[in-house]
Amino acid sequence: MRNFKYRMNRFSGLKIFLLAFAFATTKCEAQSRGLILALSKADHTLAIVDPGTLNIVAKVPVGSDPHEVIASADGKTAYVSIYGGGSLHELNVIDLVSKKALTNIDTRPLFGPHGLMFANGKVWFSAEGSKAVGSYDPATGKLDWSMGTGQDRTHMIYVTDDAKKIYTTNINSGTVSILVDTLIQPGPGAPANARPREDWKQTLVPVSRGSEGFDVSPNGTELWTASAEDGTIAIVDLNAKKLTSKIDAKVFGANRLKFTAEGKLVFIASLRSGELTIIDAQSHKEIKRLKPGHGAAGILMDPDGSRAFVACSPDNYVAIVDLKTLEVTGHLDVGGVPDGLAWAVQR
């Protein structure tokens, strides 16, 4: 009986070990399929980083003023906006498999591409110099849609997965644009074979001048944006399409805002003070302020909920923040004046 129990204990221990090993291997493999993408404004490069080892596996040259980066849904292609303060007109395309630059996209007549999203198979971008947003279809190699906002400095962009709703912040106008794709049904007297047509409707929600960085809550119901000028955080109800509250967070110089993956915390980076302010998404109370550097810009959340990456542009590094302890645990050198960050999940 004693030998039987001994054998069973050994078997149970081996089973637990094998399960733990399988879990660790699966997690490692999942990480190895992903990549961190980080732009250097000074070096004009896109750094491709292994998130497991934090080693830079390649640096690819990009245009003269890179600001934001996004990856395709399959993680094989990256797109970089070449901004020029609203004067340039280029998206750089990088093959993430071969680690090489591909043919650039000329966005004219849309100038000043900045914010980027990849949704429904297309690249969506804000065009600040043209007070507009647009989309590029990689399948056809063409710009296939655009719409004006009529707002000053249409800067950042968010597009829902089905590409039926677009949100932008308009910095100098102090507004959020909510663009919704609706179908207009044929009216009375229309031919029998008449089809519904698409019609985009814009709703402008006043927030605060200087509102730039923003994010949409993981459940898709709220948009939070921080103002660099008055330091407030505006919360927009996306279903009601109206401002519901403002938090006097004193995040002066706010540059970017990001929810953690599960939506419990909100991070706000200040390019002016270098502070990283952390807010509880439910109570709207400040939890902590960190000083990862002399200026904080782009924020990237690890999909597994373990880390945040914060581009400290004046310090020439990306700070790594542990999301459990909310402390800076390291730095990543991706080149001078880092800014735009993105994940590429290769499938």
Image (cartoon, rainbow, N blue to C red):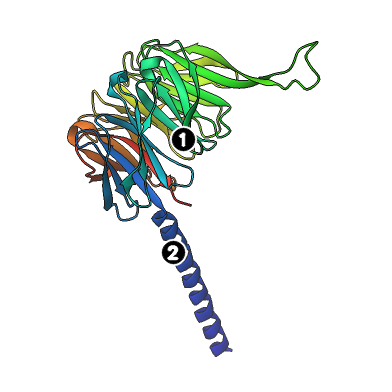
Q: Position of residue 250 (x, y in %)?
A: 32, 19
> Which one is nearer the viewer's eye here, 20 or 337?
337
Residue 66's place in the image compared with 12, above or below, is above
Residue 43's place in the image compared with 126, above or below, is below
Q: Position of residue 10 (x, y in %)?
A: 50, 80
Instruction: Judge the density around disc 2: few (<14), some (14-19), many (≥20) Cα neighbours within 10 Å.
Output: few
Q: Can residue 282 be seen in this snapshot?
A: no
> Which one is nearer the viewer's eye here, 322 or 332?
332
Q: Residue at (52%, 18%) from the top-left corner?
A: 178
Name the side, left or right, on which 4 lies relative to 207: right
Q: Residue at (50%, 18%) from the top-left corner?
A: 147
Name the side, left or right, on which 253 lies relative to 8: left
Which quadrant of the figure contains the N terminus? bottom right
Question: What kind of element bears circle 1?
Answer: loop
Q: Residue at (24%, 45%) from the top-left corner?
A: 332
Q: Position of residue 341 (x, y in %)?
A: 34, 38
* N-term-proximal mark, 2 vs 1: 2
**Residue that badge 1 annotates:** 141
Q: Amino acid at mark 2?
A: Thr
Question: Residue 15's mark?
Answer: none
Question: What kind of element bears circle 2?
Answer: helix
Q: Position of residue 177 (x, y in %)?
A: 49, 17
Q: Amino acid at mark 1?
A: Gly
Q: Nearer the viewer, mark 2 or mark 1?
A: 1
Q: Can residue 65 be seen in this snapshot?
A: yes
Question: Residue 25's mark?
Answer: 2
> Which one is nearer the viewer's eye here, 148 or 280?
148
Q: Residue at (31%, 23%) from the top-left corner?
A: 88
How many numbered markers are drawn?
Answer: 2
Location of residue 334 (image quadrant): top left
Q: CA distance from mark 2 to mark 1?
A: 39 Å
